[in-house]
Image: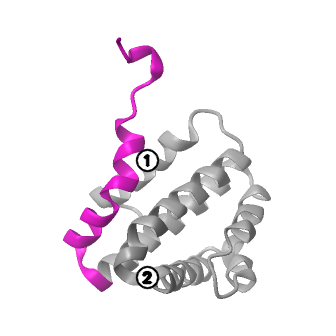
Amino acid sequence: MSTLSEESRQIVASLAQRVGPNADSERVAQAIVSTLQEMDAALTPIIGHQGVTALYRRSLQLCGSTHPRVAGTYDSVQANMDLTALTSKLVAQSDSDALFLGEVLLTTFYELLTTLIGPSLTARLLRGVWEPSLSDTPSQENSP
């Protein structure tokens, strides 16, 4: 990805915010899984849990075809979103590889959804997933 769309930049920034500075692959995996769970919660009322699972599986498959490090994850995912298998795969990566794979997976998921329901509806449905982590203020900035 040489140029990132605004949405991709927002996804990457949100994930970086969730992970925090100097995070290890375990923290990265937790942030990615948390994001996927929020996406599932936001999308299930619209496309159903099976629809979300299908998008997740297809995203993993597409990521695996371009990034072999994640290819085995697709094979280990059953009919449901097996986030435990994903977590195990991410924790086994280096910190930077785990973050990169998470960025690619979340961006691919977003792009797939966009092709199905359009960019406007996708942005509206997932806005709550990205914005809370981007608008969080550090606790020392909160005033009584």
Q: Is residue 123 left or right of residue 101?
A: left
Q: Position of residue 76 (x, y in %)?
A: 75, 82
**Residue 92 vertical placement versus 31 (above, below):** below
* First-in-chain label (2 vs 1): 1
Q: Residue at x 74, y 70 (%)?
A: 85
Q: Residue at x 46, y 20 (%)?
A: 139
Q: Answer whether residue 4 is visible to the viewer in this image.
A: no
Q: Residue furthest top?
A: 144
Q: Which residue is mark 2?
A: 48
Reply yes or no: does residue 41 show up in magenta: no
Amino acid residing under circle 1: Ser
Please state the extent of the stretch shown in magenta in the rendering.
116-144
Residue 120, x across and y down, in percent: 19, 69
Viewer can see residue 112: yes
Q: Position of residue 112 (x, y in %)?
A: 39, 79
The secondary structure type at the circle numbered 1 is helix
Residue extending farthest left: 120
Gap between marks 2 and 1 measured at Cα: 24 Å
**Residue shown at the point (48%, 65%) measured from the top left:** 106
- Pinpoint residue 123: horizontal percent, then vertical percent: 27, 64
CA neighbours of label 2 inside 10 A, class few (<14), some (14 to 19), many (20+): some
Total marks drawn? Answer: 2
- What residue did someone put label 1 on? 14
Viewer-proximal residue among 93 and 129? 129
Task: Check the picture and name the quadrant holding the N terminus.
Answer: bottom left
Residue 120 included in the magenta stretch of the image: yes
Other residues around mark 1 within 10 Å, as few (<14) / some (14–19) / many (≥20): many
